[in-house]
Image (spheres, grey):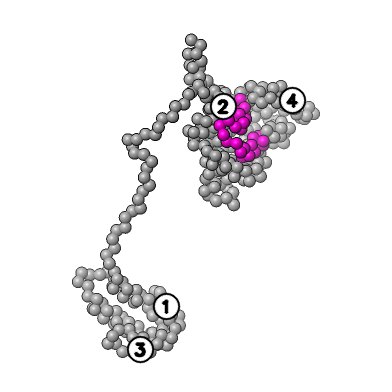
Amino acid sequence: MPLRSGFNLRGATAFLARILLRNLFTLSHGLSKPQAGGFALISRYQQANYFTGLNNFSIKTSIIPLQLFSMFSFFSRQQPQQPQPEPAKEAATMTSTERPPIQHVDEASFKDVSSRVAYLKAFLKFTDEDGAALNAAKPIIAPAVPAVLDIIYTNLISFDVTAKAFVPRQPEQDQNDAEATSVEDLTLTHPNILHRKDFLKLYLVKLVSNTDWSDNSKFWDYLDKVGLMHTGEPGFKHRAKRPQLRVELMHCSALLGFVEDIVLNAVMGAQDVDLPTKTKIIRAFNKLLWIQNDLFLKHYAPEPWSEQKEEVAAN
């Protein structure tokens, strides 16, 4: 009921009394069920005096309209509502005229894995907290590895440009294994693919098992060698006598993107992990795989700043 200017409390009280009187017939019969509109049952309500000057009514069991009491409260207490101030917004860390301190980075140092990783971690904001998030992903990723490997290799042997790298048999394989003469011979159960699966399995488990995330960690050297071994260079000692493995950079980068999509899907589908933890895991994986992507790139693409430094030193 909207308030009008010149509101008279006594007149409103009389008006409400008339409304109550119209309901007394119903009330005096002691209804036992709530009526529509929020009526409440009150037991053994004795000698209820509703307003001064009205007759007294003896009601043993009555339903008192809650709206009436609410209206009395409204008329006696209602005050114009003041607009509430909006919550203060979090202050920005700096104004538009300010700038962060500049960090000097020696580009020539990027030839060193630890220096390169230090810069990448700083730029991507990769911290020990991200490392902990990756470790938290192990219970999710490890059980899914067999299925993940099948998904990855199904995709790899679906394109001749990626499948051709798996045609040659590796020296450590059983010489009695069936040979592949073309990409059409490759299946998920072919000995060549089963052999390659073992390496990728170790790689995936290593991503979520590492505990040393410092700049000088051997883990980064491992990721660097993973990049190098795809250029045709051995990379690892155990590959020194193996056939040359050359996979072009675009395929390596595409594979990392494909792996990230699989990991994201696995993490988001985990039933017993809350959303904040899932978010931390996904963000950490994203940063880590971009570091791995750079450690591929450094072995494929020339880095002019390093060449320029060497030329200056030679002169």
| Residue 269 seen in the current view | yes
Q: Is residue 62 above or below residue 280?
A: below
> What residue is pinned by disc 3?
57
The answer to whether residue 215 is magenta is yes
Q: In front of the other: label 1 or label 2?
A: 2
Mark 3–mark 2 Cα distance, whole angstroms, equals 93 Å
Q: Position of residue 146 (x, y in %)?
A: 67, 41
Please give left or right for residue 80 compared with residue 157 in the image.
left
Identity of the amino acid at label 4? Answer: Pro
Alpha carbons under labels 1 and 3: distance apart? 18 Å
User: Which amino acid type corresponds to the residue marked 2 in the rendered image?
Assistant: Val
Name the spot of residue 271 as percent of width and height, x first. Answer: 59, 51
Q: Residue at x 66, y 26 (%)?
A: 236
Q: Of callouts 3 and 4, which one flags the residue occurring earlier in the amino acid sequence?
A: 3
Q: Which label number is shown at residue 113?
A: 2
Given this view, does label 3 or label 4 mark the residue nearer the observer? 3
Looking at the picture, does residue 4 appear above or below residue 230?
below
Between 227 and 197, the one nearer to me in the picture: 227
Q: Which residues are magenta?
A: 200-228
Tell me the kind of residue under disc 3: Phe
Question: How far apart are the alpha carbons under marks 1 and 2?
Answer: 76 Å
Q: Residue 113 magenta-drawn?
A: no
Going from N to C along the chain, the mark reached first, 4 or 2, is: 2
Q: Which residue is mark 4?
A: 171
Pick whichever of labels 1 and 2 is earlier in the sequence.
1
Foreground residue, 124 or 268? 124
Q: Secondary structure at mark 1?
A: strand
Quadrant including the N terminus? bottom left
Q: Earlier in the sequence, mark 1 or mark 3?
A: 1
> Spatial distance from mark 1 to mark 4, Cα to Cα?
86 Å
